[in-house]
Image: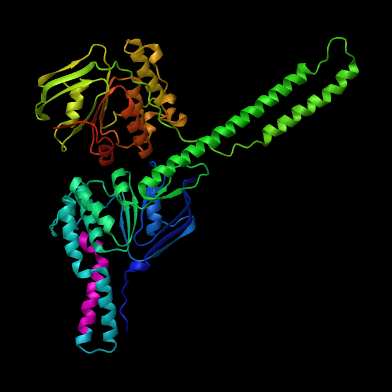
Amino acid sequence: MSIDISLPARARAHLNAVDVCLARGGRPVLTGVNLTVSPGDRLGVVGENGRGKTTLLQVLAGSLPPDSGSVNRVGTVGVADQEMPVGDDRTVGDLIDVELAQVRAVLRAFESATLALTEGRPGAERDYDEALAAAEATGAWDADRRVDISLAALGAVDERDRPLRGLSVGQRYRIRLACLLGAGHDLLLLDEPTNHLDASGLDHLTARLREHPGGVVLVSHDRALLADVVTSVLDLDPTSDGLPRTYGGGYTGYREGHRAERERWETEYRDQQNERQRLAQDLSAAQNRLVTGWRPEKGTGKHTRATRAPALVRAVHRRQEDLEAHVLDVPKPPLRFQMPALEATPGVTLLRADGVEVDGRLETPCSLHLRSGDRLVVTGPNGSGKSTLLAVLAQTLTPDAGTVQRRRGARVGLLAQESPPPSRRRAFEVYDAAVGRLVSSGVLDENDRVGLTQLGLLPSEAAHRPVNELSIGQQRRLDLALLLASRPQVVLLDEPTNHLSMALVEELTQALSATSAAVVLATHDRQLLRDTAAWPRLRI
């Protein structure tokens, strides 16, 4: 009798979703999702927080049924969720066994088939051939070695008897990711796999995904990983027709296609708005003529007035019908970030730090000299004092040694890594109050005031909600708005890509490169470091 083994599909591996739709609490989460992933395909899934990326992975994995549409899978599937529950008594070895369960089953089947062959049982040769094919297809004998290599590369615990309960979330995640990379699955579904990885771990993950022979679906905000790995991108963010878009040509193709799609959307919306405005003006003009314009010269008889009036009435009705027939079927495009002018006199020294130190936080003396238009990237490992240095430059932290001098009247703004405790006041109230204080204290002139909506960071609906009800990303956008409202001549940014969308990060990066203010940036974001490769570096 044949042994029941799930053979890897390899060249036949396939993942297909057709018109997948799903709603939660009456709110559409996924609408009309179509995708196909075959061996060698690496599909990136992008979108703002709450757009359904994690939900889509659950649907593709089969753990969540869609409301409509279909999903077909051929081949073995490995899934890495963002969250990872931990049993009370499991060990590292138990977790490895769970993730390599298919490999373990293949090896057990091969051992049984080998024993049956040596004992000369009926049908043993056929069972042995099938078991050998399965073991070779999965690389079963090499799976544990592959896991060990990934454990080491990802900086994960490799002691099989270590209890999971005593390990950090990051350690547990890295162990599971190492198992998935070593298990030889046909299809990998990964949700933000760069979480909890350092530089060497990121390099290892990138290399393994690029050489993975099967298909990959990758949910990530890591622009560098997307640029290095994906062959196509599924964008779940809003579009002019409400349907997701898939872009070929890797991450570069996505950026170019997304930009072109956005420009088309804005043009169509603007054209429809202009046409509606023209029709409304025509109607208004016709109504004015009906009220006054049809009256003939003084002394003209009633008959003339009577014959002209019906034509004017018909003209009003015709224009009214034209206006009512004009349908605005293109929704309003999402906001674009608009950087305010940050004026700084060319060539003047705005900020200077000499030998600043903070005990236990910034042990290496740091010095820098910032003029208008200067750019600087602060680099160094975690804990080296990058955030501390920026706080010292912003004069929110007093150094234990060294000095900081600021040009008289120079405005310095800091975007910290984390948002302050959220207020219960509405976002626009918090913003308007902050700008009001700047104006009343003389820091800003009334003419320098920038309205919240002018920045394109928060839509009206979000601006009118209490800050404590905003998402983390929206709170981060408010932080950025408050920074720019002060019209700083020195801009200090501590991990500015945290919680911000890829589109906003790219718009912000372009704006920072063009401003006349001085900019100091501390980041681990690999793509941002690439985009600012020409900026001077200060390593601490």
Highlighted range, magenta = 95-115
Predominant secondary structure, magenta span: helix
**Residue 371 relative to residue 477: left or right:** left
Q: Give residue 217's quadrant in the image.
A: bottom left
Q: Which quadrant would the C terminus be assigned to in this image? A: top left
Question: Where residue 256 sits: x, y (%)?
Answer: 41, 43
Q: Is residue 459 visible?
A: yes
Q: Does 199 appear in magenta?
A: no
Instruction: Judge by depth and name the residue closer to the eye, 121 or 72.
Output: 72
Seen at 43% across and 42% down, the residue is 258
Q: In front: 170, or 255?
A: 255
- At x 47%, y 42%, the residue is 261
Compare residues 82 and 515 and report the one nearer the observer.
Answer: 515
Residue depicted at x 26% and y 20%: 372
Q: Is residue 396 visible?
A: no
Task: Identify the image quadrant of the N terminus.
Answer: bottom left
Which image quarter: residue 513? top left
213 up-or-down from 239: above or below? below
Q: Is residue 315 left or right of residue 461?
A: right
User: Residue 27: x percent and y percent?
Assistant: 48, 44
Location of residue 308 with respect to 419 vertically, above or below: above
Q: Is residue 99 magenta?
A: yes
